[in-house]
Image (cartoon, rainbow, N blue to C red):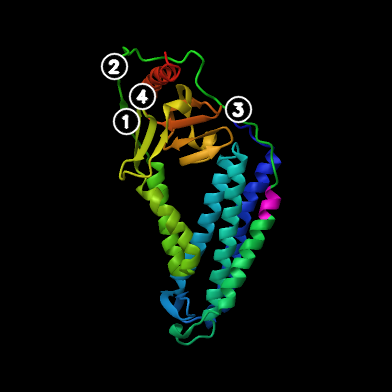
Amino acid sequence: MPQSHPASVNARRVLVAAVPPALAAVAVLATFLSVRDRLPDRMAVHIGPGGNADGFSGQGAFLTTALGVLLGDGVLFAALAHWIRTTPGVQRVLAVIGGTVAVLTGWLIVAVLLANTDVTDASSATLPGAQAALAFAAAAGYAAVGWLICGKAEETESVSGPSAGAERLTLADSETAGWTRVAGSRVLPVTGILVVTAGVVIGFTTGWVPALPLVITGVPMALLTGARVTADRRGITVTPSLAPWPRLNVPLQRIAEAGHRTVNPVRDFGGWGYRARPGASGIVLRSGDAISARLTTGSEFVVTVDDAATAAALLNTLADRERRTAAGG
C-alpha cells in the first residue's frame, strides 16, 4: 500500500487547494461591496462570446451563487487533498486543479461585477475579450506555482496481490463455467450530478468556457451507476450496465493468479471509477470485496464486486487450464 508522505507536504497541498478559493471569495465580496451602489438591480451575470449580455440576475442571488461556488470549490478540493494523502500523485493533481479553478472563476466573477458598474441597462454590459485571456493566464500561472509549492513526495508502492495458495474451483476437463455479477456505485452518480450542477451554475454565472470541463466530466460519472463483471474463459470482462461499451477485458493469458481482497477507493486508489497508480489498476466502484488479479507483468488488477472469492477461484482454474493447453499438456 502507498505510504503517507510528510505532514508538511500534505499541509502545503491542502493549502494549495484551499487558499485561492478563500482569497477569491474575499476579492469578490470586497469588489461587490465597493461598487454595490453603482450596480443595476438587475445585473448581467453572463456575457456571451460576442461580448453582449444574455443572462441576468438580482444582486443578492448573484453574490450568493458566486460565493457558494468559490467556497464550495475550496471545501471540496481541500477535503479531497487531505483524504487521499496516501496517494501523493493524485493528491498533487487535485490540489492544483482546485486552486486553479478558483483563480479562473474568481477572476471572471470580479470582471463581471466591474462590467456591470455604472451601467443603467444591464443588457448593455460588455466584457472585453482580454478579461477572459487574463483569467486563463492567471489560472495557468497559479497552476505552475501551485505545482511547485506542492512539491514531490516519495511514494512507496507494494503490490498486494493474491496469496500463493489461491483457491481453485473444481472442474472436470470437459466442463466449463462462467461467473457474472453486477457491481453498483452510489458515489459516482451522486458525484457526477454535483459536478454537472456546479458546471451549470458556473456556466450561467461566469461563462460556459470554464464550465464545459465540469459538464463533460460530470455526465459520464452520473451515468456510471454500475458495471457487469464477468469471469470466464475470456478472463475478466467489465462492461457498463447501461451500455455495451466501453468494454475492458483482461485475458486469461495475462493472469498469473487471482484472489480477492478488501479495497478502499480513496485510500488505495485516490477515488472511484477506472483508477491507475504505480503497480495497480482497476475498476473501483465502491468499498469492499474485490477480485485481485496478479498479472504476468507483476502488477495488480482489481474489480470491486460481491462474491469475488468465487470469481477468483474460477479464474485460477481456467488460467491453469489455459497454461496447460498452451504447453500442449
The residue where tag 3 is placed is 158
The residue tagged with tag 3: helix, strand or loop? Answer: loop
Q: Residue at x 54, y 45 (%)?
A: 80
Residue 61 included in the magenta stretch of the image: no
Q: Tell me the quadrant of the picture where the N terminus can be found.
A: top right
**Alpha carbon separation for disc pair 2 and 3:** 37 Å
The residue where tag 2 is placed is 175
Q: Residue at x 57, y 32 (%)?
A: 279
Q: Amino acid at mark 1?
A: Arg
Residue 149, percent from left and from top? 70, 51
Rendered view: 173 above or below 223: above
Is disc 4 in contact with disc 1, using a CB cutoff of under 8 Å? yes
The residue tagged with tag 1: helix, strand or loop? Answer: strand
Q: Quadrant of residue 131?
A: bottom right
The residue where tag 1 is placed is 181
Q: Horizontally, is 15 left or right of 249 in the view?
A: right
Q: Amino acid at mark 2?
A: Glu
